[in-house]
Amino acid sequence: MSAAPWVASAALFALGLCALVLRRPLIAMLLGVEMAVVAVAVGITTTAAAAGDAEALASVLLVLAVAAAEAVVGLSLILQVHQGGRAPETDSLRGLKG
Amino acid sequence: MGCWQFWVLTAVAAAFGGLMLVQRSLYAAAVCLLVVLIQAGGIFLLAGAPLMAFLQMVIYAGAVMVLVVVAIMASGPGGADPGWSPLPRPLVGATAIVLFAELAWAARGLALPSGSPAAAAAAEAHIGAVLFGSHVLATEAAALLMFLSSLALIDRRSQP
């Protein structure tokens, strides 16, 4: 087994983190989070499949399920921000700023 | 499976991940992420986890990405980010490269265990027993979480 899955996991996580930090639209930030989650899933799944670890594969399944739920909640919140008359960007969410 | 297939999928996933980072259009960024998710499914398949590859395609590349595209359509006209990018693009690229190099250096001593396809197949066959046996609480909690997240889609303003 080559190191390619690890390289893919590292690259995708780095790119997802950059998207989360550098992008302003909330949806773009959410896409970065999803990419980071996929990166973790790639690393765990390839190792678990090679080791024959069923518990690790089950944990990846749970991660996918929770990530899907997180995407649903995040997107609904973004739509709520948009329907409240504000742009779905980080610059428009300053309600807690003192 | 040969190693070159892994490297091809890795290169395509990383390339489209980088494209997603620099896209002005949110639609294009979503399509780039879709390609990344498909490549991840391919990596799962090559690693000997076809069930995980199938679920990755159905749940992530299917349901989640359709939801993202619908949300982009509903979030406003254009689906573009006219203010991108606040930082110079070479700096964005250098940041991604530094992060990748750091993670790759941290993982340099790692080595995957030498398993067999039969072991991977046996592990996937055992997933159901794990999910509804020793990890039943986590499974039920995840199911409850998904149900509660679906309630977030209900627009209370549309109710009488």
Image (spheres, rainbow, N blue to C red):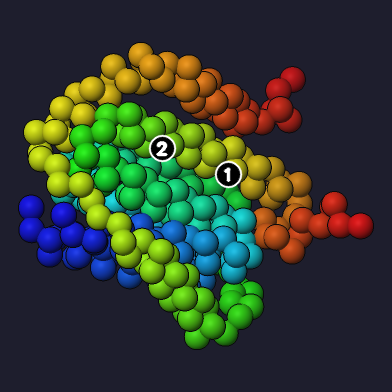
* Side (left or right) of A67 relative to A83: left
Mark 1 lies on residue: A75
Count of marks, rendered view:
2
Disc 1, SS: helix
Could you say which quadrant of the image residue B104 lies in?
bottom left
Q: Nearer the viewer, residue A70 or A55?
A: A55
Could you say which quadrant of the image residue B29 lies in?
bottom left
Could you say which quadrant of the image residue B132 lies in?
top left
The amino acid type, in three-letter code, at marker 2 is Leu
Residue A31 visible here = no
Residue A3 visible here = yes
Say whether mark 2 and mark 1 are on the same chain. Answer: yes
The amino acid type, in three-letter code, at marker 1 is Leu
- Residue at 51 percent across and 71 percent down: it is B24
Q: Position of residue B75 (x, y in %)?
A: 60, 52
Are the residues at dot 1 and dot 2 in contact (C-beta closer than 8 Å)? Answer: no
- Residue at 26 percent across and 68 percent down: it is B11
Q: Position of residue B115 (x, y in %)?
A: 14, 42
As drawn, which residue projects farthest toward the top? B133
Q: Position of residue B114 (x, y in %)?
A: 15, 47
* Side (left or right) of B49 relative to B31: left
Q: CA distance from mark 1 to mark 2?
A: 16 Å
- Residue at 33 percent across and 29 percent down: it is A55
Above or below residue A46? Residue A26 is below
User: Label 1 neighbourhood size at 10 Å, few (<14), some (14-19), many (20+)?
Assistant: many
User: Label 2 neighbourhood size at 10 Å, few (<14), some (14-19), many (20+)?
Assistant: many
Q: Which mark is residue B18?
A: none
Q: Which mark is residue A64?
A: 2
